[in-house]
Image (cartoon, rainbow, N blue to C red):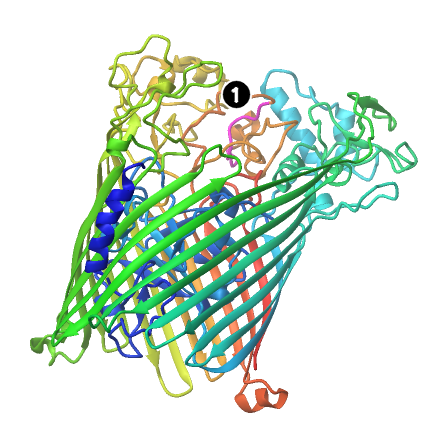
Amino acid sequence: MNNIKNKISVWAVFACLMVPATASWGQEATSSAVRTSDEEEVIDLGYLTLPKRAVTGAVSSVSGTELRKSPDASLPKTFAGRFSGLTTRETDAELSRGGFSTETMGMSWWIRGLSTVNGTTPMVILDGVLCPNTNYVYLSPDEIESVTVLKDAAVLSLYGIQGANGVISIKTKRGRVGKTDVTVTFDQSLQQMTRRPLFVNSGEYVELRNQAGYNDGLGKYSQFSPSDVEQFRAGGNELYPNNNWYDMFVRPLTFMSRAGVTVRGGSEKVQYFSNVNYMHQQSPFKTTEEPSSQYNPEPQNDWFNFRSNVDVKFTSYLKGFLRLAGNVKNEKTTGYSNAAVYDHLFNLPPTMYGPLTPSGDGYENGGQVVTHDDEGTPVYGMLNRSGYIKNLYVNITAQAGLNMDLGFLTKGLSIGGLMAYQTSTLNQTRTTQDFERYIRTKDMSGLYFTQKGSSLNSPLKYAKSSTMDYNLNLYAHADYNRTFGEHSIDAMGYIFYQKQELQKSNLPYKRESMGATVTYGYKNRYFIKADVGYSGSEQFHPDKRYVATPAISGAWIVSDEAFMKDIEWLSYLKLRASYGITANDQFGGARYLYLDYIDINGNEGLKGNPNLSAEKMKKQNYGIELGLFNELNVSFDWYKSRCDNMLVSSAGTVPQYQGVSLDNYPKTNGGKMDNYGYEIEAMYEKRLNDDWSFHVGGSFSFNKNKVISVNESPYSSDYAYRLRTEGYTSGQVWGYLIDYSNGNGMFNFKEELEASGLTYAFGTPRVGDFIYQDLNGDKMIDEKDIAPIGYSRIPRQSYHLTAGFKYKGLEVSLLFQGVNKVSTVASGIGVYEYAYQGVFSDIHQHAWTQERWNNGEKIEYPALSLNESTNHVANSFFVWNASYLRLKNMEIAYTLPKHISKKVCAENIRFSLSGQNLLTFDKMRSKYIDPEIGTMGDFQPYRVYNIGVSLTF
């Protein structure tokens, strides 16, 4: 970015002359720059704010008060179902999660789906400052004024190369003029996983294992003898155990406690908002502090948040602000991650003796850890004899800025600046120790054990490490806001610089960008808005580094026209339209794509392409906002995005280089992709009298993308589908189609198998296995017969329903959230029965057997196997419908009458009962796997029951 300084200088002059609507850097929404009544809603757009009627773009906004109804420890998880156009999917519900990357928040999110096959993560802005890591995960709803999702070019082009995937703007609370209010909150929660995995008992387990061995041609009792089967069925004999390892090591309920104090108030000169929050989460695992242990293995998870926002009026023309916030997280886990411990639970069959050898046998007479031949790290040892890890995460954000009113030069002109510093540090203490493993012999007449491997019980070893990331952000902006009779102008120009230092990276990340926006209004009824962002990226050659992202938009308040005044039932009608360009430079972590990659040994990697440039998305949006009878509000938006220069590999379009693998072919801007959809929102609010009011509403969003071109080379003509990406949705699932023409899609007898004449390229089918469709008619089932199945992992349709009422001090609210037209590819633990020494779930209890088929009994799974078979490939059986409807949130609250509150010197006392993920309705084949997670081996989403109290003094 050598030549950006000259360009910034030129643009800085332009910015100072152009100057947009109210800049949000430290200014309150009620500043003089916003020409609106006190009752009119003001929308936070990240770098600026505008009165709602002047907003020409597509946005959705929710208050922090609304978010607080969801008793979830992670802020992003409270967003689910509250914004039209924002699709979320919980990817891991592990309670204790720490770190600085997007993966650590345990969820994925998309604003209006995918506009490119590359970077898809929305940009997050916290108090007008880019938040490049996940510090916002730790925010408490008590700190938040509002969260706004920005969706179209009218509100995104200003952000230049970072706005392509949408923006989520989080605004924290500020002080206010008035007496000091002190609010104290306390919440106590119970948490339990929505899906508790099935662990079959030993009697059922041995039958299913023998059944699998019989199907594999090994005989009826190849795994367990008839006497063993009888003993395991009978139970009650320690020589033939029946262990439920999940119940042994996982708590059915865990506790979460939260407490907070907020102080808010101020004078004309100084306004302040301060908040502190504490949270403690109990570990999901049961541990045992052994008498001979050198440490307490019980995990812990404690968070401490603080925030102080201060605004100062130095003079009539000079204002300043200081924002200081942070999070301290003290996390202690076992020597293994929680995810690893949970995964290894499924490695242990119920027939295994354990978790320790009989008391008095070794390790200071506490017993040795028992395992089996295929498990090297049994759960008991992971939890209690592997040491521990202590992580201390410290995230600090500081902002300071000034705003100067230059009205003495020309009315409406102002300038401002901001410096923000964000740092994230991790101090880790890791202790490790090893433990002896023992395996029970095959002699079932007694408890006899032999040692597995050469590991010994060892003392604790200590190691310490630390990492630090920091971000320095500098902003400068100029604003011009003025009204000339019936005409108004709101303008802004800004310059932004960011330096991001990551300890794990050798070189810092730097960004420099600028932008300007102008909104012209006539009669406070007609609005035209022009925006432009101009930014550069280190991803590209200096000659291709910078990109301009302009946009034009407009809005018309039709209901303000004279010819509409007599339509009494029409309280509001607004039309919006926008067209513009956004850009993207995020390509999965790769950097400097214009350079050849060569390692220290001289080995070549990715070939560079100096002609690469940022991806550009041409976005259009058309919307209507409708109000009826001053009670019903409806909005509709249709949008489309086209990327004509998407970053893709050149492997399919250029001759093969000698010695260069296909993965190292240079990237090009040769891809194309369309993304389109619509959104509908409605809310009906009715106040019946001074005591009664109610509301009911919802939203529905549809989104679909289509990959037009990725330089894909078509397969030969004997493939049923010659293209696997072009012409399809990004992430389209592919696999073999099962032939259900015989009723159940399986070979039900030997003659049927032989008569089919089919040969499988990936194994030999057995009776009871799936019959796959031979799409190209060559009698060979191979990759040439693969076809598109279902949908992608990103829902095409998402919706929410909300309802509630108020009666005096009583409030009740409900939030349902759902998705449709979404698929998950089920595999692994709890789906494939051969995993480890057999992991069986409900779908395996009615697996195919000759007897079941002959008797016409229910069959829900193909013939079991001890090993991977022709069934265990991507096919239409394992592509499950992941649609669902959840009762996402429910709250019942009661605010005591004022005269009662005052008896304890309080102005307001509010009690609440709330819940999260209370009910789920879905179409998954297994009732033990959540549709968002898609596998049994990961933590399932938690159901939360919460009781809370809030006192304001």
Q: Is residue 686 above or below residue 339?
A: below
Q: Position of residue 930 (x, y in %)?
A: 51, 46
The reply to whether the magenta stretch includes residue 715 is no
* Side (left or right) of 682 relative to 751: left
Q: Is residue 78 above or below residue 450?
A: below
* Side (left or right) of 547 relative to 388: left
Q: Is residue 243 visible?
A: no
Give the residue drawn at x 51%, y 66%. 308
Q: Is residue 222 above or below residue 446?
A: above
* Side (left or right) of 432 relative to 832: right
Q: Quadrant of residue 842?
A: top right
- Which SS class for mark 1? loop
Q: Magenta segment range? A: 856-865
Q: Position of residue 204 (x, y in %)?
A: 67, 35
Q: Position of residue 246 (x, y in %)?
A: 68, 43
Give the residue drawn at x 38%, y 25%. 736
Per the image, the residue denoted by label 1 is 869
Quarter of the image with the N terminus in it: top left
Q: Is residue 607 visible?
A: yes
The one of 788 and 579 positioned closer to us in this rendering? 579
Circle 1 crowding by C-alpha within 10 Å: few under 14, some 14–19, many from 20: some
Give the residue drawn at x 69%, y 19%. 222
Q: Quadrant of residue 416?
A: bottom left
Name of the residue lying farthest toward the top: 658
Amino acid bearing label 1: Ser
Dominant SS in magenta: loop
The one of 224 and 714 positioned closer to us in this rendering? 714
